[in-house]
Image (tube, helix red, strand yellow):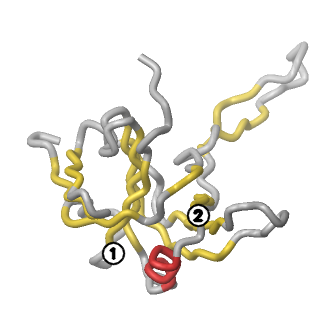
């Protein structure tokens, strides 16, 4: 069944620990920004040319997926801008939640990143001023839809728990 983008979200919690290979995604989280746009967690894989002089046309092998910086857009809101500014230089756990339930019922992707936010360009006189949140991934975004349950606290807070056997 198709879904709309309504209540797709990005939530975060500060990263604790030293090992990026052993990340604990459980615990208390907050809404990063009331997003208007959310980019794909990972991009399409690179193509690696494998053509030989024997081939009638170019051939390729699938390479690694790309995971460039991600830009989330939201309305410029001081509380979110200030909150993200306090995270500058720190690593945070991010979880992108997809689905109209607001808790990632259709898909969840989690990773560690560093984030920053700035007001966006203003293109005219009759516009809502937006902000851009940039996330630089420190780990590969991984699909974790069936591994974690997200509970919405109702006030921009969330609790993430691991599914038994997940």
The residue at 68%/62% (across/down) is: 128
Nearest to the observer: residue 33 or residue 27? 33
Q: Check whether the beta carbons of the residues at disc 2 and disc 1 lie within 8 A of each other.
A: no
The residue at 62%/61% (across/down) is: 69
Res. 14 mark = 1
Nearest to the observer: residue 82 or residue 146? 82
Residue 23 appears anywhere in the view: no
Report crowding for label 2: few under 14, some 14 to 19, many 20 or more residues within 10 A (C-alpha): some
Q: Residue furthest front?
A: 126
The answer to whether residue 97 is above or below residue 94 is: above
Figure disc tally? 2
The residue that mark 2 highlights is: 75
Q: Quadrant of residue 121?
A: bottom right
The residue at 45%/78% (across/down) is: 79
Give the image location of residue 11, x and y in percent.
38, 60
- Is 151 situated left or right of 138 in this image? left
Q: Residue furthest top?
A: 56
């Amino acid at each position: 069944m198709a879904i709309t983008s309504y209540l797709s979200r990005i939530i975060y919690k500060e990263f604790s620990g030293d090992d990026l290979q052993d990340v604990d995604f459980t615990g208390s989280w907050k809404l990063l920004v009331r997003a208007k746009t959310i980019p794909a967690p990972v991009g399409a894989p690179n193509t690696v040319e494998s053509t030989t002089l024997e081939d009638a046309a170019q051939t390729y092998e699938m390479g690694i997926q790309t995971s460039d910086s991600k830009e989330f857009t939201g309305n410029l809101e001081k509380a979110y801008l200030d909150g993200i500014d306090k995270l500058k230089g720190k690593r945070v756990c991010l979880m992108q939640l997809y689905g109209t339930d607001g808790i990632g019922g259709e898909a969840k992707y989690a990773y560690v990143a560093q984030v920053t936010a700035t007001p966006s360009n203003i293109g005219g006189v009759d516009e809502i001023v937006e902000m851009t949140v940039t996330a630089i991934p420190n780990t590969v975004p991984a699909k974790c839809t069936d591994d974690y349950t997200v509970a919405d606290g109702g006030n921009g807070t969330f609790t993430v728990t691991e599914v038994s056997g997940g």
